[in-house]
Amino acid sequence: MAEGAGPTVWVVDDSPLQARVCQTALSARYDVTVFDGGAAVLETLSLGEAPELLVLDWHMPDMSGVDVCRFVRQTVDSAQLPILILTANSTNESLLEGLAAGANDFVRKPFLTPELNARVAALVRSAALHRKLLATEKQLRVEADFRERFMGMLAHDLRQPLNSIFMANGALVSALAGSPLSKSAEIQRRAAGRMKHMIEEMLDFTRIRPETGMPIHRAPTDFAAAAAGIVEEMKSSHPEKSFDLQVVGDCVGNWDPERLAQVCTNLICNAVEHGAPGTPVLIRLDGTDSAAVEMSVSNVGQPIAPDVLAQLFLPFRRATGKVPGTGVGLGLYIVEQIVSAHGGAIAAHSDHAATRFVARLPRA
């Protein structure tokens, strides 16, 4: 029998008088339904119906309120369906037993109507906020999934025309060799290369999942050889910069070779972009630790502000003063994801002397 309006509250009590007292205390603000025992309320719950709050009397002949609470908590957590137990027990042991069973709160009998209403209101409000949070989270997941799908499709569709640009530019570079226009063709090629890098970063971003991170495929890999190859590429694409690669110890481990090369590329590119003109980029590999290899990449330049430094590894974040058009703010985030996927860690340090990124990767 339901009375009043508002959030639904189910009261379970084998005593008609006690149930009526509780219903009267709550009916002004809530839609109250009374059940005469635990079996009855559990049967109704099994049919898919549920209130916004369940009020249980502790002592009932068929099963106690604590037993009902235990059954309910097997399928419904305390945030989805809060449970308030009415009890004459005042011992700490009894209260701890109820909390362990999954009760959210207690009201001692005989209760005061204002106290009962206050505690019921708090639990109903908490449950409503939880439902709102779940709905918001679901909507955000839908929107995030749409954005990721869109980015993935966009990046994939941009690949084909970009490949055509590369092919046409390659022919143009060859045809203009020795011509005054050859420099313009080379500039176009570097610009296309940056665009390709941005597209690859967008695709990588869509592959990262909150639950599992960046997918990797481990294989025996020589970190030093991978870094040396990237440094040679950098020397070719940035002839105005000098690169100093230092290797100490054994740098072989079980990593994803493609992702490892990506870590090297992104960190060295970052140092090139932010390094002061005429200063070298220092890359150091330390394999003296049998458990892990440490890579550091340093450049001299404008120090990174502490507030910016703290957010460098978040997506779509950039250091201040970055040249517009050089990236989408995913490079360091992807580095951090790759390092984390390997069970490692990366940190950044920056002062007036230098900016230094240090990545530590376990060998297996």
Image: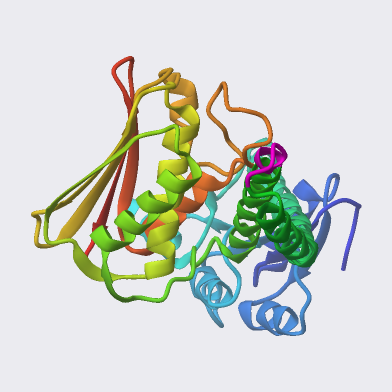
Among all residues in the image, which is located at the extreme front? 178
Residue 191's place in the image compared with 218, above or below, is: above
In depth, the one of 344 and 49 nearer the eye is 344
- Residue 225: x and y in percent read 27, 62
The span picked out in magenta is 178-184
- Residue 272: x and y in percent read 45, 34
Magenta stretch containing residue 180, yes or no?
A: yes
In depth, the one of 140 and 251 nearer the eye is 251
Would residue 336 be seen by someone viewing this image from the given angle? no
In depth, the one of 205 and 100 nearer the eye is 205
Q: Which residue is found at the position 50% from the left and 52% from the top? A: 334
In depth, the one of 299 and 79 nearer the eye is 299
- Residue 131: x and y in percent read 72, 55
Magenta stretch containing residue 6, yes or no?
A: no
- Quadrant for residue 258, please give it: bottom left
- Residue 200: x and y in percent read 62, 59
- The C terminus lies in quadrant: bottom left
* Colouring convention used in this rendered image of the protein: rainbow
Q: Which residue is found at the position 49% from the left and 64% from the top? A: 214
Q: Which residue is found at the position 43% from the left and 71% from the top? A: 216
- The N terminus lies in quadrant: bottom right
- Quadrant for residue 55, please give it: bottom right
